[in-house]
Each structure stands twice: as C-alpha cells, then as structure tokens.
Image: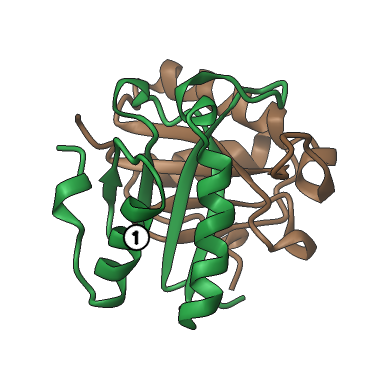
Chain colours: A brown, B green
Amino acid sequence: MEKPGKHILVCASFRAGGEPQGICHKKGSIDFVQYMQNELLDRGMHDVMISTTGCLKVCDRGPAMVVYPENTWYGGITGEEDLDAILDAMEEGEVCEDLVIS
Amino acid sequence: MEKPGKHILVCASFRAGGEPQGICHKKGSIDFVQYMQNELLDRGMHDVMISTTGCLKVCDRGPAMVVYPENTWYGGITGEEDLDAILDAMEEGEVCEDLVIS
C-alpha cells in the first residue's frame, strides 16, 4: 500500500453503535468532510487522505480534526472559510495557527 | 489540550450517513476497539488514545488500523491474539512487523 502523505481525521462523533451524536456532528462536521474531499480533488492534493472518526474527546473545542502524521489538532471550525485556511496552510507545508487547539 | 502519545485509529467502515458497512466492520473491528480500550486501561497505557474511523480504503487488507503519529498501518487482524501482539510491541516502543501492511 502507499501511505497518504497527510491524513486529515475529522471528528464525526461516531459511537460504537454507529450512530453519530455529539458536538462535532451536530455542528456539521460531515459536511466539512464532503467539502474538503472536493477541495482536495480541485487542488490536486492527491497525497492527502481524509476520514471521519469517532469522538475525538475534545468536544468543548469542536468541531475538531487532527492532521497526522504531523500531529496538528484543529478546533472551533465554523465553516468553509476555516477549512480553506487549513488546506491553504497544508499546501504551503505550514500550520493554520489560528485554528490550532493548544 | 494534551495530545495523546499514540493514537490508534481502527477502521469501522463508517460511511457519511453513519451506517457502518464494509469488511472491517463485518469482521468485528468494533469489538477490537472495545478489547483494546480495556487492555489499554489494564496495562496503564494512559497516553494511548483509540478511535474508530470511517473506511480507511485498505479493505482488501482489513480488518485494518493505523497508529499515529508513528504512521504504522496494520492489517489482517484476526482477533485478540493479534491485538495483544500490537499492544505488546507498542509497550516496547516497537512495531509488530508481522501485521504491518506494506
């Protein structure tokens, strides 16, 4: 297999039963995934993978995502403008400091 | 926030609608998560986080999981013996080569 260069993991608040609950899901994180997937295609960022995850346990900072292997945690994402900022930074090999959870 | 030292991401084959499908889920990956969560507690591995993910796109190598930030991909996991082997390796700061997807 070929490992992705970067892997964006977006909290979708899935629980073991499969039914999403929680902050990130309620605040539209599934739509974020769809938007980012399209953006990755449009931008030709083919080495970036995106997945949903179960609850990332940072509910009070949600909607949240983490980028591995660089290990950058983002939170408080409100919509497409924030997602673009994260992808812009990623394209430049940088981190979007404004949205980092620290 | 305090980042986990290691983050085990177990493919649970979730799709955008929330309903799990696919190989990893059918082969019991949700049970793997439950087992590993208990083992992490028992072993006192408190800096290891575990989450489910949507489809990791390695269905033909499933059930699969990835450990970040070290970026180790495991597949063909059959049950508790394999999960113990992965956790044993992790405790030793090593990789369970037998189960690595390469």
Residue located at (66% from left, 23% from top):
B16
Residue located at (53% from left, 25% from top):
B26
Observer-nearest residue: A93 or A68?
A: A68
Q: Is residue B100 visible?
A: yes
Residue located at (47% from left, 45% from top):
B10
Please determine whether, in this image, residue A96 is positioned above or below residue B39: above
* Secondary structure state at the residue bearing disc 1: loop
Q: Is residue B3 visible?
A: no
Most distant residue in the bottom direction: B44
Binning the other alpha carbons within 10 Å of mark 1 as few (below 14), some (14 to 19) or many (20 upward) gives some
Residue B91 in the image: x percent, y percent?
31, 76
Q: Chain of mark 1?
A: B
Observer-nearest residue: A46 or A21?
A: A21
Left or right of B82: which side holds B47?
right
Q: How many discs mark residues in the rendered view?
A: 1
Left or right of B57: which side holds B3?
right
Which corner quadrant of the image does residue A21 belong to? top right
The quadrant in which the N terminus of chain B is found is bottom right
Which corner quadrant of the image does residue A95 belong to? bottom left
According to the image, label 1 marks what residue?
Answer: B69
Residue A27 in the image: x percent, y percent?
82, 41
The quadrant in which the C terminus of chain B is found is top left
Task: Report the amino acid beneath label 1.
Answer: Pro
Left or right of A62: which side holds A89?
left
Residue B56 in the image: x percent, y percent?
42, 31
Please determine whether, in this image, residue B74 is positioned above or below residue B22: below
Observer-nearest residue: A3 or B42?
A: B42
Observer-nearest residue: B5 or A90?
A: B5
Residue A50 in the image: x percent, y percent?
47, 33
